[in-house]
Image (cartoon, coloured by chain):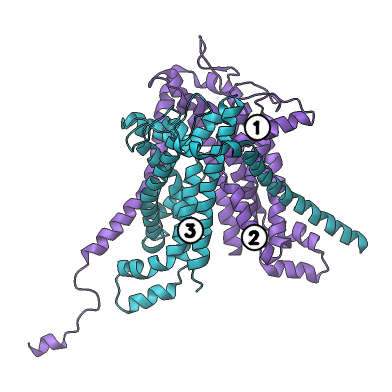
Amino acid sequence: MRARAVRGRAFQGVLLTALVVAFATLATLVYTVVRDGWRSLDAKLLTEPPSISPDIAGAHPAILATIYLGLLVLVMAVPVGVGTALYLEEYANGDRWYNRLLELNIQNLAAVPSIVYGILGLAFLVRGLGLGRVLLAGGMILTLLALPTVVIAAREAIRAVPDSIRQGAYALGATRWQVVRRQVLPAALPGIATGSILALSRALGETAPLIMIGAVTYITFDPTILGPFTALPIQIYSWASLPDNDFRALAAAAIIVLLGIILLLNAFAIWVRNRYTQRW
Amino acid sequence: MTTAELAAPRPLAAKRRRLSEDVVRVVLALCALVSIATTVGIVVALVFPALEFFADVDPVDFFTGTDWAPLFEPARFGVVPLIAGTIVVTFWACLVALPLGLGVAIYLSEYARPRLRKWLKPALELLAGIPTVVFGYFALTFVTPLLRDIGIHVEIFNALAAGLVMGVMLIPTVASLSEDAMRAVPYDLRDGAYALGSTKLQVATRIVVPAAVSGIVASFVLAISRAIGETMIVLIAAGQQPNLTFDPRQAIETMTAFIAATGAGDVPTGSTEYKTIFAVGLTLFVITFAMNIVSIRLVRRYREVYE
């Protein structure tokens, strides 16, 4: 019996090691970034444009562009994503081959490498449509990238609304759209909001597709929707690729800003989930 | 009003279809069409330039050539070094992510108390939410020097640091999907095993893991697919040198890093170098697509059995 107990303990120890490795890496990563970056984390980083001299370089245009990109993704990905989810959950007949294909398609899109979305953007938006290497093209690609995540989260939220709510509304003579708009959507809103914010925070950290769009440029002026741009993750990549330690420190400081934005969004999402989610 | 009219019952269905109801249905279907259009767009964007590329370069040379030097004169387009680079990084990432992710999943599903689980799961999501460019920075500025300190002679850019960091990044991917599968295993199976005198270890390893195996394999396949498609960590930390080597201490170039590095440069549209992006991209897309479909199928299988 003792040998069994020892083996059980040992196994639990091995499992705990796996957890410890994951969280120790997370902690070390945060520690390294803060250690390297806190000296460069000042007002200049937020207010000044990049420069060839690390003493006066900041990430103002990149931070601004990341905020614009976030707004574009919110405005485009959330309505289309929720629309898709509503179609699949409330309108589509799940037995039809095209609806099954649609479902499979969205699941696959969620796992397509982000660089492939970048190729799509390069081929169609930048060169095909002749939009050029502009912020709007970046926003559209990040929207397509975030879309499957929004759809999957919104579907789960919509599915969690009990059918009795719908039946009750139908019994009172509501049409399908009235049921969806007045009953299903309000009930599913916290889940949709949480999922959308999380998808947004993922999209804001994406770098590879923006590289393809051509955001790796030296931009010292504030971005506009139809102008060239550089985003915060791209700025981090540019600075991290320079061998100079002062630029590495700037990269670390910019990482702190990016992680701060992402952490805030995540915390907000969790707050929404805990505050507003209904238990049926 | 005549008696006949009074006697005829009004039909229960609405007299006229509401136009707005149809409009809504069409609008929602159009939203759904966006994701179909995305896939079609990706395929079109990749296939046609890739076909043009294969008109310039023999596909056999492309898939079997061991020399990747598109900017040299004469240019050589053998994709094998890029695929080898991808395999090396993916191998080391899996060496970390698969066992550790599975360990975390077993712990969360079978051992952790509900209150601890409630904290651990969001914390793991946080790890999954860190941008890959940050992991790349971490691999380059922390892990590579650390490897040198402990006596592993890695180059400044090397596949090992990139692979190990990518492995940690993928732990939540493996853990969350595997844990879902394990929690879907009915408690009757566990109770039956306990009733026969099994220990917790035996229940976890001989009942739960085998019963959840299709979900676990799905999580592994998805993690491998992610590792193959990951760009920023390898671009920053593994270098941009298409070496045909399986030595993880050397700088290499993966398919994704090549695409990003070439896409960032200003290669003229229509040139063969420009088209290489699409040929390599198509190769990458086909590989990851096949793995994603396998993973999705496996997940459906365990859902069908237990839910």
Q: Give chain B's shade.
A: purple
- Residue A116 can be seen in this image: no
Q: Which chain carries label 1?
A: B
Number of numbered tags placed on the structure image: 3
The secondary element bearing badge 3 is classed as helix
Residue B141 shows which numbered tag?
A: 1
Quarter of the image that includes the N terminus of chain A = bottom right
For mark 3, what is the residue?
Answer: A194
Q: Which amino acid does label 3 sit on?
A: Thr
Q: Spot the cyan chain and give its letter.
A: A
Q: What residue type is labelled 2?
A: Trp
For mark 2, what is the residue?
Answer: B119
Measuring from the top left, give residue A261's x and y in whole percent.
Answer: 51, 47
Measuring from the top left, give residue A255's x and y in whole percent.
Answer: 56, 39
> Residue at the location (61% across, 63% down)?
B306
> Residue at the location (34% across, 33% down)?
A227
Q: Residue furthest top?
A: B73
Report whether mark 3 lies on the same chain as mark 2. Answer: no
The secondary element bearing badge 2 is classed as helix
